[in-house]
Image (cartoon, rainbow, N blue to C red):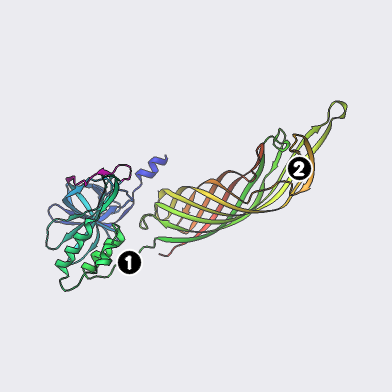
């Protein structure tokens, strides 16, 4: 069911379609996160009405109000690779001509800046008021052969932008040092387009981040593995049930959809562990049963970067899964062993009874997987699995800690 939930779900937002006849149809557009430019738009005149598919041949433009706008053009598309493992030897000027939807990034009286991304790379286009068709802002990365081949980046787009600025801002001088520093990035190019249009950058109204705070139950257990009496048959490893606290920040890949979220989470956890087993020593009539026991307390600060994917995504309800890597920094106390068999340097088994007989490491890491529900973009309920992580570094045996967490987070949204 998960692929069905993920790919069949719609997200209709107020928008419009411009037909080939120049008519503007107002209604709702199915707005989704995507990695490449679209080739069609799904449209509804009313939310409860039937949907229509407008392909790139059926409309000249479409938009989702206050979120994004696409316009159709026939343009040249550069084919040079920017992948470091697949660079061309020499300047690659190959292009293909195609009909595409270009995404509007910045619009004004003098120029309109567009973006176009396909599986090969992301490109930027600019439409000067003196022209009818956008031209690609070109950057070419290639290998220049010679005695010592080197990678060269030809930033032709800087020269293109300088020429456009001279045509449109005839009374303003160009700071050459400033323009050489322009990068082939959406933020830099949007600022340049706004400057040519003599406009201020309009900041996004949707918040790209949010904070959260939460608490929950940490169910954890420490276990011996390897060659140790506490790892043998009959070993009892008591589970620890203690609360935890968590705070963090979310970064939305697309704030309007919130389908993919990058999360950094800091948690504070405790665990009280007890491992018990019985073993026999001696031989013949002198066999004696001894009860071995090891207890310790663990206090952990855990930093977890993770990626969240909302499989079901509406404003009222979201169902998500996430994966990440937990970085654990721990302190310990009451690290006490009783009747613990240890093999010494001479290969002899000795029985010890003392505190801090084992060195427990302060740093480790573990994979973490979560799933849960979000209600009204405010309340998050989750269940998490933390893969076992070793807290010792011995050759013949180890102690690992594994966790299950059940939490509730309160989401602090800016919008």
Mark 2 secondary-structure assignment: strand
Kindly check if marks 1 and 2 are in contact, taking CB atoms under 8 A apart as contact.
no
- Choose between 217 and 261: the one closer to the eye: 261
Q: Position of residue 373 (x, y in %)?
A: 48, 51
Q: Position of residue 60 (x, y in %)?
A: 17, 53
Q: Which tag is nearer the camera, tag 1 or tag 2?
A: 2
Mark 2 packing: few (<14 Cα in 10 Å), some, or many (20+)? many
Q: Residue furthest right?
A: 285
Residue found at x 45% / y 49%: 319
Residue found at x 64% / y 49%: 361
Q: Residue furthest top?
A: 284
- Choose between 216 and 15: the one closer to the eye: 216
Look at the image and tell me whether residue 128 can be seen: yes
The boundaries of the magenta stretch are 83-97
Q: How many marks?
A: 2
Q: Position of residue 248 (x, y in %)?
A: 50, 59
**Secondary structure mostly taken by the magenta-highlighted segment of the chain:** loop
């Amino acid at each position: 069911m998960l692929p069905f939930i993920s790919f069949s779900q719609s997200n209709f937002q107020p928008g419009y379609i411009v037909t080939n006849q120049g008519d503007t149809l107002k209604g709702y557009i199915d707005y989704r996160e995507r990695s490449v430019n679209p080739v069609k738009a799904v449209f509804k005149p009313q939310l409860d009405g039937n949907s229509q598919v407008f392909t790139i041949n059926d409309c000249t433009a479409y938009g989702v109000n206050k979120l994004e706008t696409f316009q159709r053009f026939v343009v040249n598309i550069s084919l040079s690779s920017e992948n470091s493992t697949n660079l061309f030897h020499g300047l690659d000027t190959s292009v293909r001509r195609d009909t595409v939807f270009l995404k509007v990034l910045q619009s004004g009286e003098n120029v309109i800046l567009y973006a176009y991304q396909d599986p090969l790379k992301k490109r930027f286009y600019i439409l000067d008021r003196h022209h009818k068709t956008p031209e690609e802002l070109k950057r070419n990365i290639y290998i220049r052969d010679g005695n010592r081949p080197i990678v060269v980046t030809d930033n032709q787009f800087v020269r293109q932008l300088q020429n456009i600025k001279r045509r449109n801002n005839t009374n303003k001088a160009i700071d050459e040092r400033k323009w050489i520093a322009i990068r082939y990035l959406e933020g830099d190019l949007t600022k340049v387009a706004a400057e040519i249009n003599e406009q201020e950058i309009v900041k996004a109204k949707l918040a790209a981040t949010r904070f959260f705070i939460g608490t929950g139950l940490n169910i954890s257990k420490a276990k011996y593995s390897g060659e140790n009496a506490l790892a043998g048959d009959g070993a009892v490893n008591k589970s620890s049930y203690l609360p935890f606290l968590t705070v963090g920040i979310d970064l939305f890949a697309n704030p309007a959809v919130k389908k993919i979220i990058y999360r950094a989470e800091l948690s504070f956890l405790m665990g009280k562990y007890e491992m018990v087993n019985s073993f026999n020593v001696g031989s013949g009539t002198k066999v004696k049963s001894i009860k071995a026991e090891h207890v310790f307390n663990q206090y952990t600060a855990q930093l977890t970067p993770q990626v969240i994917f909302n499989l079901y995504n509406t404003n009222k309800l979201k169902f998500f899964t996430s994966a990440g890597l937990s970085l654990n920094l721990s302190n310990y106390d009451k690290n006490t062993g009783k009747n613990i068999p240890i093999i010494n340097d001479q290969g002899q088994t000795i029985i010890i009874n003392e505190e801090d007989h084992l060195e427990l490491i302060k740093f480790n890491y573990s994979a973490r997987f979560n799933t849960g529900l979000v209600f009204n973009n405010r309340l998050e309920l989750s269940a998490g699995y933390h893969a076992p992580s070793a807290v010792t570094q011995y050759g013949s045996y180890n102690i690992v800690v594994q966790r299950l967490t059940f939490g509730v987070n309160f989401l602090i949204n800016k919008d």
